[in-house]
Amino acid sequence: MTAIATDSYHLFLDSFKSKLSDAAKLLTMPQLTPLRNQYPSYASPQTKIRLSMLATAMVDALGGPAEFQGRFTFDPVTTMIPNDNFGLEPGVWTDDTSMALCLARSLAHSKEVHDGFDEKDQLRAYLAWFNRGELSAIGRCFDIGGTTNRALSMFDTYQGRPIKEILNIIRRNLSAIVFSGNGSLMRVLPVGLTYWGDESQARVYAGRSSCTTHPSPLCVEACEAWTVAIVKIMQATATGTQYLKLDVIEHFSSYPYSNSKLQLPLNFPKSVTPLRSEASLAEKEEYYWQHHPLLQKVSRTNKGESGKEIPGLPYPMPSVKDVPSTGYVVDSLVAALYCFMGTQTFEEGALMAVNMGSDADTVGAIYAGLAGVWYAEDVPSEKFWSKRVIEWKEKLVKRELVEQVTDELVAFSEKLTKNL
């Protein structure tokens, strides 16, 4: 055999081995159940509220150590470990959970309005957390976003004035695109859990809750769209109505965004021919996998065309280019939704979210709120309560505080729902 032929043979052999290796990886990787066959776990609204709030705290604490880390640069995070970023013991949740608890307690206890939604009371709660560590896992505020910090400083200065005037000051100073961080999206969960019986009211209140610290139109719209998704799942599981994961991605793709920065990663390109109205569920799902930008990324990653496998995680991790996980609200929303759509248990999505690095705890908390509502169940199973998730719960610091505030929210939500 000539030298050229030998080289060609070895090149062919190497290529063949590589393809065999790729095929083997695909065979061992768990295959996603079709989205049209994935349903939420049915449970009472009380269970959904309790477990989604607990889920937020668990994944927030799980992701804290990976915050600020570059993707693929750290050992996989699968258990509660110390958070060296702030010198914290394992299981300590961060500002994501603290602010969600502040909002939840304000909704449950505000006395100024009958339906609980009072922006001034919410800002007081956030300021008490910032100044005195109320509703913190360790009794002090150890981390706060820049935009939130600015908004609370303005509130502290002008809190003697009427709330409309205060909100106008915050809006004038913090509405620019540069202030479009994820600080309001990370805490908005209690709004959907409280007002789930009225989608329109929940959407409006989600937007208004953002305006207390993040009045950027991008942040407002992100909170509204995310909250409506939570409400739709809550309503479906409470009434026994069919709602599929395919419906979740349809919600985000059909939402009437006014901002192209949200529309581009969550909607179909304008060049794509619309789906036939008479298409079957199978045809509809195929259309989404072929044309929806987020599902295209899931498909590319799972086929090994981009991203990378991380030992110990069930699915490949998307590349930073495809799915950045920064503190920019669009990146955080898309990353959290990717983790939800690209996995099929609560644990799988949580592990993907926190191992993205960058703003890992916040992406994890945002994911966990939605996924908690989806997977929370009255009768425990692996969909939510895997052995690993049970371990996360057992190691969660100040779990009783999270549960106490959540019980208050449950009681108030029940009261509101009865009055509908």
Image (cartoon, grey):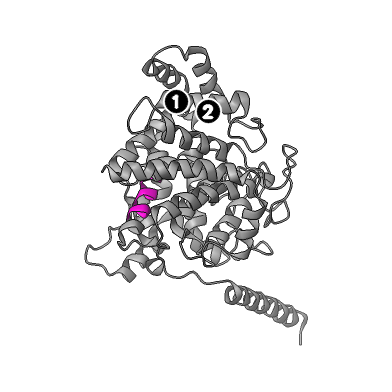
Q: Is residue 234 magenta?
A: yes
Q: Is residue 190 left or right of residue 418?
A: right
- Residue depicted at 60% across the width and 30% down the height: 144
Q: Callout 1: helix, strand or loop?
A: helix
Horizontally, residue 150 falls left or right of residue 263, namely right
- Specify whether residue 182 is in view: no
- Give the residue drawn at x 39%, y 40%: 412
View extreme (bottom): residue: 1
The residue pinned by badge 1 equals 121
Per the rendered image, the range of residues in magenta is 226-235
User: Regarding mark 2 in the picture, which secondary structure is present there?
Assistant: helix
State how far apart marks 1 and 2 are (Cα): 9 Å
Location of the N terminus by quadrant is: bottom right
Q: Where residue 160 sits: x, y (%)? A: 45, 12
Q: Amino acid at mark 1?
A: Asp
Residue 66 visible at all? yes
Q: Quadrant of residue 276?
A: bottom left
| Mark 2, other Cα within 10 Å: few <14 / some 14–19 / many ≥20 | many
Residue 292, position in %: x, y?
A: 40, 57
Q: x, y (%) of residue 186?
A: 51, 40
Quadrant in which residue 118 is drawn: top left
Taking the image as shown, residue 11 lies to the left or right of residue 151, namely right
Q: Which residue is mark 2?
A: 126
Q: What amino acid type is highlighted by mark number 2? A: Tyr
